[in-house]
Image (cartoon, grey):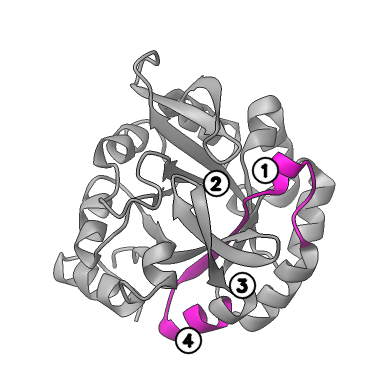
Amino acid sequence: MAVAIRVIACLDVDGGRVVKGVNFDNLRDAGDPVELAARYGQEGVDELTFLDVSASKEGRGTMLDVVRRTAEQVFIPLTVGGGVRSENDVDELLRAGADKVSINTSAIHRPELISELSQRFGAQCIVLSVDARRAADQPSGFEVTTHGGTKSAGLDAIEWARRGAELGAGEILLNSMDGDGTQDGFDIELIEKVRAVVDVPVIASGGAGTAAHFPPAVAAGADAVLAASVFHFGTVAVSEVKDALADAGYEVRR
């Protein structure tokens, strides 16, 4: 039996509220994370991803209280990221109710952190978040960014994804910073290039606007598809995404 394609709702949280903008700019309030998490659990999302979008920029850890209250409302896997810098941070998040932890900026600064976390907690718990955007000066045509896409990390995004998986990341959360919030569709070329160099699951993120955008991302190599604003503001229902995937011949969880 084929492995079901996962549909994931992302909660970008800033100051205790879910926010969404375009290319991480002009953020607008999308609601209470705990209430939204409960709603998505009822609507049938397969997983939730909770990203504290201001934690790295503000130099602090993820808000454990919001994570704890969110985890109490959902009975599906919860991935949490934002401001994760150490084994202790991961330990606290897992104890607060996270099933997986996403790392980004800290891994760029010290890649061996990926191996350390993978060895202690298991690769299945560690998600490497890659915020990629097009860049002519990189061999693949894509670069890694940090701080919500505001800074270049000076790394080739495809090579970084490959190295991250090699170091022990159990999944790659691949976010197109060019597509984020635009609702113009997933970056198919980016997904294909990462799929070609990693064996671990790839989560496609950034650009979803209609249910029809999701099957091409899977065709390009994504094992899971993630969206935020289209779910938050009711543009697309979770059931519509699963119907579109099923109609395209992909296994989904009902």
Residue receiving disc 3? 33
Three-letter amino acid code of the residue under disc 1: Ser
Q: Residue 16: which quarter of the image?
A: bottom right
Residue lying farthest bottom? 42
Q: Residue 153: which quarter of the image?
A: top right
Three-letter amino acid code of the residue under disc 4: Gln
Q: Position of residue 57 (x, y in %)?
A: 69, 40
- Closest to the camera, between mark 4 and mark 2, is 4
Q: Are marks 2 and 1 in contact (CB under 8 Å)?
A: yes
Residue receiving disc 1? 118
In terms of depth relative to the viewer, which is nearer, 25 or 90? 25
Residue 83 visible in the displayed image: no
Q: Secondary structure at mark 3?
A: helix
The numbered disc on residue 42 is 4
Q: Position of residue 248 (x, y in %)?
A: 15, 65
What's the distance in space between the residues labelled 1 and 4, CA to CA?
31 Å
Q: Which residue is located at x 41 percent, y 59 percent?
A: 226
Residue receiving disc 2? 170
Q: Quick check: 223 left or right of 113?
A: left
Q: Count the numbered circles shown.
A: 4
Q: Are marks 4 and 2 in contact (CB under 8 Å)?
A: no
Instruction: Please report the bounds of the magenta region as a residue range.
Output: 37-63
Look at the image and say whether residue 146 sits in the magenta stretch: no
What's the distance in space between the residues labelled 3 and 1, CA to CA?
28 Å
Three-letter amino acid code of the residue under disc 2: Gly
Choose the circle earlier in sequence order: 1 or 4: 4
